[in-house]
Image (spheres, rainbow, N blue to C red):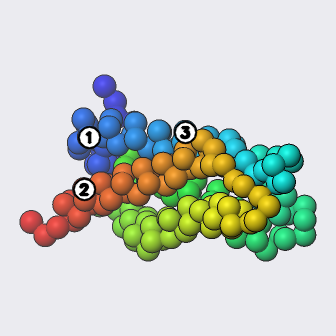
């Protein structure tokens, strides 16, 4: 049976772990998609008027409301960056020769930018706290926020797991 990627990829060298890591990465992608599309919070004002907000709708509203810089910042850290990170994790785990210089550059990128992973969850949490602090408004957390946070946390865990394999394979032996 032919391997999907390089014969020297981590997935090819660790087949059982490879399947598990790929399933977890696919789950993280699915949770991210749900977290972006599904409602994050429902805000009730004066106990009568309600507004349900998803991450993508919030970015769209910021863009249309002339808050383009904030929309770009939130879209970058909450949409673009997580998607790139997940795709790069799939690439590093499945397709790349683990001895190539390109592979080492991708690992360095992941190590450098992984520190920013929780920023997007922090921004959403601040949004919820800000709304909850309003005297005339209440916010109810929706499933989208949990899906989004689960995607970020799962991505961090899988990234650390992959990092463990990269440390083992690059250790002097």
The residue at the point 68 percent across, 67 percent down is 133
Residue corresponding to mark 3: 30
Which callout, 3 or 1, points at the residue further toward the start of the chain? Answer: 1
- In the image, 40 versus 64, the foreground residue is 40
Res. 165 mark: 2
Locate residue 79: give its quadrant: bottom right
Mark closer to the chain start, 3 or 2:
3
* Quadrant the N terminus occupies: top left
Name the quadrant of the C terminus: bottom left
Position in image of residue 74 (x %, y %): 69, 65
- Residue under the point 33% across and 35% down: 19
Q: Gap between marks 2 and 1, in whole Å?
A: 10 Å
- Tell me if mark 1 has few (under 14), some (14-19) or many (20+) residues whose alpha carbon lies within 10 angstroms of its own: some
Q: Is residue 76 above or below residue 154?
A: below
Q: Position of residue 141 (x, y in %)?
A: 63, 49
Q: Which mark is residue 161?
A: none
């Amino acid at each position: 049976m032919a391997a999907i990627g390089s014969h020297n990829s981590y997935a090819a060298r660790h087949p059982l772990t490879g399947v598990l890591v790929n399933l977890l990465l696919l789950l993280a992608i699915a949770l991210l998609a749900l977290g972006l599309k599904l409602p994050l919070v429902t805000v009730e004002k004066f106990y009568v008027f309600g507004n349900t907000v998803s991450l993508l709708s919030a970015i769209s509203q910021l863009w249309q409301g002339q808050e383009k810089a904030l929309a770009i910042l939130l879209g970058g850290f909450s949409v673009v960056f997580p998607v790139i990170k997940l795709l790069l994790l799939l690439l590093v785990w499945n397709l790349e020769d683990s001895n190539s210089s390109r592979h080492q550059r991708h690992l360095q990128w992941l190590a450098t930018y992984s520190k920013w992973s929780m920023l997007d969850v922090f921004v959403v949490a601040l949004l919820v706290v800000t709304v909850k602090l309003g005297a005339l408004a209440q916010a109810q957390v929706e499933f989208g926020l949990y899906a989004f946070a689960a995607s970020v946390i799962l991505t961090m865990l899988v990234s650390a797991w992959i990092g463990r394999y990269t440390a083992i394979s690059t250790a002097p032996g």
